[in-house]
Amino acid sequence: MTHAFAVDRALVVIAFKRRLAYKSGWIFGLALGGGSMLISMAMWQNLLGGGSLNGYDWSSMRAYTIIGFVAATMVFGAADFQIADRILDGHIAVDMTKPVDFQRARAAEYVGSMISTAPTAALGVLGAWLLFDPPGPVTPMAGLLTALCFVLLFPLAFGITYLSVLVCFWTKRYMGIMWLREALLSFFSGLMIPLAFMPGWLQAAAWALPFPHFTTTPAAIYLGRVDTAGALGLIAAEAAWVVGLWYAGRLVFRFAVRKVTVHGG
């Protein structure tokens, strides 16, 4: 067990250092994500003005937008292509001969790449805080529970990404899969617009998926739209998705590797 955790830690560090080598990626991520956040802030400020919409006023929307920015930076900035490439270029055949669990190793690498997005997220939040002065969490407990939501985002994001990457066994391509996953996540998480603005049937469909836990859940807890019991329920649901997606990934992988196709000479 100790050896397994040592391997996990080593893979996290390697993935983190690999991403550190590409500092231009930080600048690009900050410019792209930070620019999108500023545009979103300006849009909501003009739309809401001094009023409110479905329980969201300009003050709460400032915090909501920043939470969405942090989640998007973490999730969209992780190195999912490295996992897909191992399947598409045939390295998966070599990985299967190693005494290391493939899914667990990829999870460690994915978490390491997500941690490397921290400087981009921190700089973006600092800039937004100075420019827009968003409200803090409604209570210290809400702040702690929001932080717990973000911790669970690491395994939750990996679970969704890993399942989508495994589709490469059948499609032999990944770009389209990635675009579809990111579009679904952006829409059903509430990143584009809060789920509260959507029709009831669409909200129900969204909550039947793991995506709302990327933005709507931490924002609801942070802004006090749910009480402590409700917040714990949302976190429990998020944790359940983490476990369910992990085992779903193992099941799909076991089925997928029955046939490995390697392209090349």
Image (cartoon, rainbow, N blue to C red):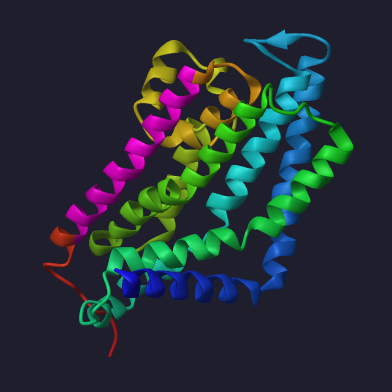
Q: Nearer the viewer, residue 188 or 217?
A: 217
Task: Name the side, left or right, on which 211 lies relative to 173.
Answer: right
Residue 154 magenta: no
Residue 187, percent from left and from top: 51, 33
- Quadrant of residue 259 within the rendered picture: bottom left
Residue 244 magenta: yes
Q: Give me the residue at 37% from left, 68% from top.
A: 5
Q: Which residues are magenta?
A: 229-253
Residue 68, percent from left and from top: 62, 37
- Quadrant of residue 255 within the rendered picture: bottom left
Vertical placement of 174 versus 69: above or below?
Answer: below
Residue 9, percent from left and from top: 45, 70
Residue furthest left in the image = 258
Vertical placement of 151 versus 43: above or below?
Answer: below
Indicate the quadrant containing the N terminus: top left, top right, bottom left or bottom right: bottom left
Magenta span: chief secondary structure: helix
